[in-house]
Amino acid sequence: MREVRKRIGDLLVEAGVITDAQLTQALSQQRELKMRLGDVLITQGYISQQQFIEVLEFQLGIPHVQLYRQKIDQKVIQLIPHKMAEQHSVLPLRVDGNKLILAMADPLDYFAIDEIRILTGLRVEAVIASQEELLRAITRYYGLQGSIEQIATRMQETQEEEVLQTAQNDDSPVVKTVNQIIMQAVHMLASDIHFDPQDDGMRIRYRIDGVMRMERTLPIGMMPVITARIKIMANLNVAERRLPQDGRVELDLDLRKIDIRVSTLPTLHGEKIVMRVLDMSGSLAEINQLGFSEPNRLAFVNGISRAHGVVLLTGPTGSGKTTTLYSALSHLNRDDVNIITVEDPVEYHLTGINQVQVNSVTGLTFAKGLRSILRQDPNVVMVGEIRDTETAEIVVRAAMTGHLVLSTLHTNNAVNAINRLMDMGVEPFLISSAVSCIVAQRLVRRICPYCKESYEPEHSEAEQLRKHGIHAKQLYRGKGCGECGRTGYKGRLPIHEVLTVDRGLRTLILQKGSDQDYADYAMEHGLIPIIADGLRKAAEGHTTIGEVFRVIGREA
């Protein structure tokens, strides 16, 4: 392929992607920030990563590769030093004769191409890959792969009694490997890291945007030392392999405070470990940033603005209930309001709010903590979760004695919470008098903005929308790109169902009605079912109908 010495800025202007004024502004910022021009243009929002790739691909004929599909020999990786790969955002893919195929974020970076040509003695042929894919691949092949090979070699000769010593040595490859796995998870915005022991090795999977994604499989000989290292980090008993254990790790990564909850579980092939990752440096969203539709937002704000009553957040684990609760507390947080919480664990530290951590070892349960809180003259109380009858009854009675109580409950939808409290032994007259608002919530994946495209709805999709009074001439989906890992989705947004307990519903509760009775009444009086809220957000182009049904189920 003939080398074309053209500047990327001129090429983007010629393609009509940016203006001359934007290029001039970006060049000025480039000198200040000392970044590549393409990175400056993307950071400033002048172009997207996908637009950048498409211009180079179609205007110059430079191929675009998807790195997750590439199988790269470690010998090829060793042609370019780690530091140089990071500095220029490049990754060697393969050698064809005297030609090195090189993945680059900016294939017009001729300085990098010349440097690598001189270093390797090979002619360089550039292909395009997204910056995000390159960062992940460089971490995988340079940092993680090298440590894995060192551990695998050492473990062949290591006796069981040496495993603990290896896991405790901060300079050992196992420490670097575990740290790199965590750093990669944080970079990919994973909520959980799964270490799954199998008969042929230990699988590492990340949960990203609520969906499990396979990352790699570690050799079977590495399982004991990886498990030991994680237990040491979480202050767990390394020798105990027969019982489940729970612990916690706090790390500072790239000036970000990361909180990790660790859970171990004995399985047939060894101990399964799950690390739940929480980025404590993230700012807390305000209520109007939580994705509520306007009717649902008004109903929720009205519920938490009352002087007393119970406001419940319902949904499965990982549906964003705690984030919504914290946003509500932040909304209520004023100097003249005494707010106290009892949580397990405390996930966000809120200035001006008294937060209590449940401690089962010392006997500080939700119920015991809540009783003590009520003697501290609170206006607002937040209970992390209603797990048993005792806690449920105290919550309800606290609301009846003039307190606003916020809590969570595991139910499928809002109306299920009423009979769930009855099943826990709370009397109907207490529920009727105390509960004022119930919110059901789920998280659906958001369409990737970089590869979003419109299409005409299929007949079945249009029919599903019409069932809920929604009409859309076009829907949206993601094609899949480097920014979203080829999934078509990037990030998540909540969908809601907000049930206000009014006089009519209180009467039905006293009559011990069924879930269907409550739902029918609520629908007649303005309840927007969670499935309808999700489909409306699909019609607005935020998510897809398939994603809504994946999370809610078609029986909703």
Image: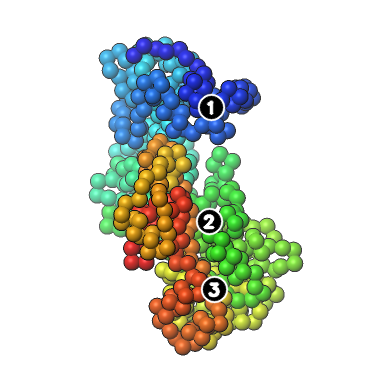
Q: Residue at x 42, y 80 (%)?
A: 517
- Relative to 98, 326 lies left or right: right
User: Which amino acid type corresponds to the residue marked 3 in the rendered image?
Assistant: Thr
Of the residues shown, which amino acid type is indicated by label 2?
Answer: Gly
Q: Position of residue 473 (x, y in %)?
A: 40, 50
**Is disc 2 placed on a helix, strand or loop?**
loop
* Residue drawn at x 50%, y 75% as measured from the top left: 525
Q: Earlier in the sequence, mark 1 or mark 2?
A: 1
Q: Which residue position is annotated with label 1?
A: 18
User: Along the polypeptide, which appears first: circle 3 or circle 1?
Assistant: 1
Q: Dot 2, crowdedness within 10 Å: few (<14), some or many (≥20)? A: some
> Which residue type does callout 1 highlight?
Ile
Marks 1 and 2, how far apart at CA:
31 Å
Residue 472, x across and y down, in percent: 41, 53
Would you say residue 387 is visible in this rendering?
A: no
Badge 3 is on which residue?
500
| Res 291 label | 2
Task: Say if mark 3 contacts mark 2, CB within 8 Å.
Answer: no
The relative height of residue 468 versus residue 520 in the rendered view (above or below) is above
Decide which of 7, 200 is in the foreground and name it: 7
Q: Quadrant of the C terminus?
A: bottom left
User: Which residue is painted at 45% across and 31% down in the image?
Assistant: 51
